[in-house]
Amino acid sequence: MHMKRKRMNRFPAILALVICLAVSFWVTGCSSGSSSSAGDSGSSGTTQATTGEYDDSYSSAAAPEEFALDSATDAGSGVAAPGEDNASQEVADPNRKLIKTQTVVMETTEFDSLNDWIQEQVKAAQGYIENAYVSGNSAGVSAARTASYVLRIPVSGVDGFMEKLRGEGNVLQYSENVVDVTLDYTDTESHIAALEEERDTLMNMLSQADDLDTLLTIQNRLTEVRYQLENYESQLRIYDNDIEYSTVNLEISEVERETVTEDTSFLGRLSEQLSANFYALGKGLQGLALWFLGALPAWIVLAVLGIAAYSIYKGVRRRKRRAALKAAEEAAEKERQNKQKEEKQEKNIN
């Protein structure tokens, strides 16, 4: 009873504590909500005032500048819109400076004629061969010759050259890379113009200077300007050459049977697979026959050595057999003589 009365006395205190905590949380939540609403309304007012001020300035001065910037960006930024190809970019702005590189990997059954064709067509397109490398030979069952070219074709004729090249062999891989160097080209021209202006100014100052220290200072600076000017002009010439002539990296492999690359029906693919397997089997048998016939001198030597070894073996066996027969005969003769002696001794005893 005493313990029960203690618990009954604690219950009102606990209930009062819970009620106080609930009231405290409710007051805190209301105060934070009101302060948040006040802050939102204050910030909203500030935003509206700022927006109104920005609209006034934009209507007077910012709009023409932004319009000019957008126009300049659309005209010369060199960034293509989604889905826009290189050809449309060139038509949109023919003053852009583009460096084109094309890579072609192909195979052919007419290796010599294709190499001669490349020589002729590059000259006809008014281009030149920057690098050429041919390796391998056509001897043996499978052709193993390869060729690697770096061709420089004028931009105006590279499309026609590539169209003709596709008809001269089986193209396995093709890729094209276009680099826009308009900004770098323009910066280089600006540097050249500034350096030329500084050079002319230094030349005028050099003709008017009468102090030795001043002459040396001007001469040193003039030397630096000329050196920088030559570097920028050399870079510009490299740009001009790369822009005017497209680079075509060409890899050629000689084969006896070109790879079929176009998609066909199931029967067509099955026929091609069977044909390829029979072809590989025939080439394998042909290679085995050539290997065997090519090693014919070795086979002859091995045959002679085998015959000689067999003859020696037969002779050794024959001599062993004769020796064994002779030993058997001698043993039989000795046994016969021993029997005769035994018979004589028995007669003498009798």
Image (cartoon, helix red, strand yellow):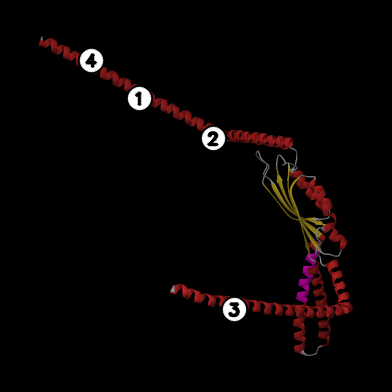
Q: Earlier in the sequence, mark 2 or mark 4?
A: 2
Circle 1 residue: 320
Which one is earlier in the sequence, the residue at label 1 or at label 2?
A: 2
Q: Sequence order check: which comes first, mark 4 or mark 3?
A: 3
Q: Which residue is mark 3?
A: 20
Badge 1 or badge 4: first in the primary sequence: 1
CA neighbours of label 4 inside 10 A, class few (<14), some (14 to 19), many (20+): few
Q: Name the amino acid type tagged 4.
A: Arg
For the stretch drawn in magenta, what is the main secondary structure? helix
Quarter of the image with the N terminus is bottom left
Disc 3/disc 2 C-alpha distance (Å): 111 Å
Q: Which residues are magenta?
A: 226-240
Give the percent coordinates (x, y) of residue 169. Answer: 76, 44
Residue tagged 4? 336
Mark positioned earlier in the residue sequence (3 or 2): 3
Label 1: element kind: helix
Cβ atoms at labels 3 and 1 below 8 Å apart: no
